[in-house]
Amino acid sequence: HCEIETRYRDLDSNLHVNNGVMASLLEEGRVRFHRTSTIGHTVEDMTSMVVSLGVEFLGQSHFPEPLEMHVGISHVGRT
């Protein structure tokens, strides 16, 4: 769990956080999750990658309210 600050430049003409910006904000949440996890901290360890990203919008986001992110691993696979 973390909070991501919204930025004024993320706004659309309706003063909502733009839907297209959400993917980059989710990426910021994923990076923070990766930094605090034990994944990929040594050469022998696995690292993470995003194979698929889906966004289901449940409401509007406004500046300057932060976004509350909950990030986790749903499946560990092999490549």
Image: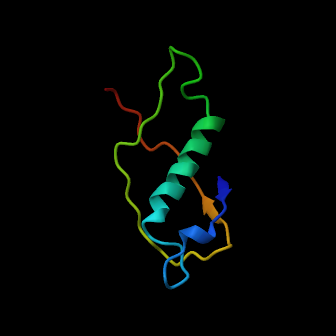
> Is residue 75 shown to the viewer in this render?
yes
Lateral position of residue 25 relative to residue 76, left or right: right
Image quarter of residue 16: bottom right
Image quarter of residue 20: bottom left
The image position of residue 43, as x and y in percent, is: 52, 15
Lateral position of residue 62 relative to residue 22, left or right: right
The colour scheme used here is rainbow
Task: Give 15 or 67, whichever is nearer the viewer.
Answer: 15
Task: Give 55 or 19, whichever is nearer the viewer.
Answer: 19
Residue lying farthest to the front in this orientation: 9
Q: Residue at x 41, y 34 (%)?
A: 76
The image position of residue 49, as x and y in percent, is: 42, 37
* Quarter containing the C terminus: top left
Residue 44 higher or lower than 79, as above or below: above
The image position of residue 78, as x and y in percent, is: 34, 27
Q: How many marks?
A: 0
Q: Residue at x 41, y 63 (%)?
A: 55
Residue lying farthest to the left in this orientation: 79
Q: Residue at x 48, y 72 (%)?
A: 18
Task: Give 40 or 17, whichever is nearer the viewer.
Answer: 17
Q: Residue at x 64, y 74 (%)?
A: 63
Lateral position of residue 8 relative to residue 52, left or right: right
> Is residue 71 shown to the viewer in this render?
no
